[in-house]
Amino acid sequence: MHPDLKNNLKEFKKHLIETTNNMEPLKVWELQDLSFQAAARIMSAPVYDALKVLFVDPVQEDTGDYMKLAELFYHHNVPLRIGFVFILNTKEEIDGNEDAGIALWRTFNYIAEESDTSQAFTSIINMYHEVKDGNVLTVNHVKDLLRSEYPHADAQSILGVHSEYDEGRKAGATFYKKTGLGPLPQALFNGVPFNREEMDAAELETVVLQRIIDATGFFQRAVFMGLLNDHVNAIDFLMDQHNVVSRINPTILGAERRYVHFRSTSVPFDVEDLSTFSFLDSQDKSAVISDNMKYLTKKGTLILYMGYMYIQKTSSHTRVGILNNPSSKIKEDNTAIARGILTAFLTQNNSSLKSFLSKLTKEETAKSLAAGTKIAKFLTPVSAN
């Protein structure tokens, strides 16, 4: 990137705010121009439409700062889709006159129905503008806004236990629990969480803008390779990427854990008899397979070596898994290769690891180890700088 973009972010933000409403439509070929002006056009154009999601508890002290930051992005048309996940009380019956978070949620739903979502968002921001520094949102802040903006609204029916505007209240807490994120507040940028240092409200604006700038490199490569042009829907292009999860999959996230049993079976079985294998239950199938996976015998070592060479020469996207299944009782002398592989993964960098594994998977190495050679001999010495 142009050094001005990385070293003078404050000036860049000022330029963005001043010019975002006066930009000409962006053509994707302009993504190849790394000048300051072109980068500003990238930032303000819909071809790059980042998604920022904030997980917040409405009654935490710092929530107001994040709401005001969202307002800044929203009013200056920064190319962000801003989403809020409100983590609220999930009791079946709860009174919004006693819980500020519930009051905020029901008021939001009421305003969205009476006006629209944009007005509801603006009203929530106005609530937080009334919260003084160091304080938290209260039910009185919510009621004051209702009285000032909707004087004819029945606050009791909106906020009360039997409110008609309670729909979706539990969804945020349920989603937050499934994500496995840490303590609130949390922020995601295109699905990637910010770390705790980046969540400082005073620095988050700069961090978000830097993330947007960093992400343009991906689009520039796509344009250069002809994968993205003016006739391609940018959102569809993003959703088709292999590292994008298009939806939260309840089958994956909610399924109970299933374990593969490798306990021995009393069922006599010939591994070559495939017609009989299909009638075994899952435990017997696993046991039969494990009994025949003696990868560290001469025959098994050759299979492992062939798998390793396939990765090296043919496909870097393939993974090889190793299950140590010695044919006799586990002892120090018959697990040398298995222990060596595990140690290598834990201690070696990628280059040394590849070299070491290549040596371990050769038959002459197995013979040498059986003859008493120490496995450390096969490690590649690291040259001192």
Image: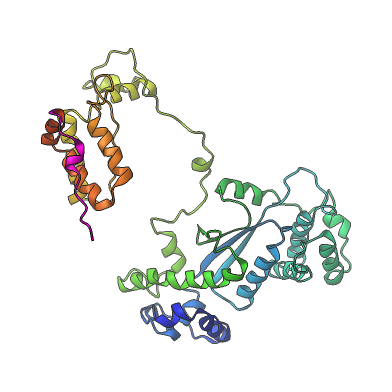
- Locate residue 63, reporting x and y percent: 69, 62
Residue 48 in sight here: no
Residue range highlighted in magenta: 371-385
In the displayed structure, would residue 152 be above or below residue 191?
below
What secondary structure characterizes most of the magenta part? loop
- x 76%, y 65%: residue: 111
Mark count = 0
Figure quadrant of the N terminus: bottom left
Q: In front here: 30 or 233?
A: 30
Q: In front here: 300 or 135?
A: 135
Magenta highlight on residue 377? yes
In the displayed structure, would residue 298 be above or below residue 76?
above
In the visual, does 180 lie left or right of 332?
right
- Locate residue 74, reporting x and y percent: 62, 73
- Going by the picture, which residue comes out furthest to the front? 384
Figure quadrant of the C terminus: bottom left
- Locate residue 134, reporting x and y percent: 75, 65
Q: In front here: 372 or 143?
A: 372
- x 54%, y 73%: residue: 206
Residue 319 in which image quadrant: top left
In the visual, does 52 lie left or right of 122?
left
Magenta highlight on residue 23? no
